[in-house]
Image (tube, helix red, strand yellow):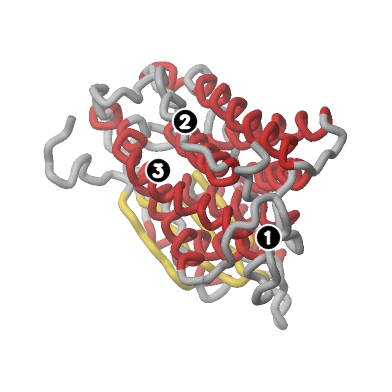
Amino acid sequence: MQTKIAANAQAMKRWLGKAETALGNHSDRLNAINIFPVADGDTGTNLYLTVRAAAQALSSTPASPDAGGAHPPEGPPGQQDVGAVLARAGQAAMEQARGNSGTLFSVFLCAAAEPLMGHARLSSPLLAAALNRAQIRAWSALSDPVPGTMLSVMEAAARAAAAVDADQNGDDSNHALGLALDAAVEAALEAVVLTEDQLAALHEAHVVDAGGVGMLLILDCLRSAVLGEELQSDLLDGLHGYDVQDPHIHADMPDDDGVEVMCTINLSPLDAATLRQRLDEMGDSVIMSQVGGAMDADGTYRWRVHVHVAAAEPAVALIGSLGEPTEISVSQLALPRNPDGNDR
């Protein structure tokens, strides 16, 4: 195992490239079972486009060849730093995030980068710290977090990696890292299976959570990229609603009224708290997370904002009253089920 492991910055780029490909291949099935929080059948597409933005942010950045488990050779600042590479990818993902799932993945990636800053390779202790930071930040980004979603999958993976790290007494060897990655993916799979009985909508439709499955795929891509192994071809076998012959569950669900509003805006901590409170009163699925951690000269932080509301205008006006939003997007929650008009 140790001769295959490459836990450096190049492996992180390979991770996101693998995740882009995997999500592209699985987007149709993820869309097919996407019924929570709204049955809009776009979780697979949203995750794919968001991960693609992260991967493309790194695709033009040269990196040295893999150096196995050893520290990579010296190179331009930031190109060998695992945390810096993921932070750059995370910011790109955050700026171009799509939907609930894409926004939460962006939060996950940005937060995971923080404990890795200044390190040239991933280790079991660092993986445990990164996954824990990421799941905490993702839970806190939502005003009303719900178990049985990709949040539960993130949490399960983090707990499993932490347990391995504790059992290995903080060993930073390649062997310990492999054990931690295996455990994280196994726990993520178990968490996905459990989602069906954690949410009434999923239980009634007899499917697992689409965002949770997407997160499982992303974690298996991380394992694959670092361990130098193929993706586990049977990983998703038996997940309810995931066989290719299964119908698009969301197609038989009632259309969801309202719109999804997303934007980026600079806000003071007080204004950010005010905006979150007022958006909670106006709509639901509120997600707010900082884009980068630095305060600017005006004492504001950059925030990514996501909300589902009945109508866009009041939400956009509210956001505009507190600052100058950029990258505003407004999408109908009720979209055509299939672009070709052939629902399955």
Q: Is residue 119 above or below residue 45?
A: below
Mark 3, secondary structure of its residue: helix
Q: Residue furthest bottom?
A: 297
The CA span between labels 2 and 3 is 11 Å
Q: Which mark is residue 83?
A: 1
Q: Between residues 73 and 62, which one lies in front from this camera angle?
A: 73
Q: Nearer the viewer, residue 260 or 294?
A: 294
Tag 1's secondary structure? helix
Rendered location of residue 142, percent (x, y): 59, 45
Using the image, tell me which numbered label, if any, was put on residue 232.
2
Front residue of this view, candidates 21 and 130:
21
Task: Tell me which label, 2 or 1, sits earlier in the chain.
Answer: 1
| Residue 156 drawn at (x, y percent) | 65, 30
Which residue of the protein is positioned furthest toward the front in this rendering?
3
Q: Are marks 2 and 1 in contact (CB under 8 Å)?
A: no
Left or right? Give the position of 278 relative to 164: left
Q: Within 10 Å of the Cα at label 1, are there few (<14), some (14-19), or many (20+) other Cα atoms? A: many
Classify 73 as above or below 48: below
Give the residue type that dot 2 points to: Gln
Q: Are marks 2 and 3 in contact (CB under 8 Å)?
A: no
Label 2, residues with CA under 10 Å away: few <14, some 14-19, many ≥20: few
Q: Earlier in the sequence, mark 1 or mark 3?
A: 3
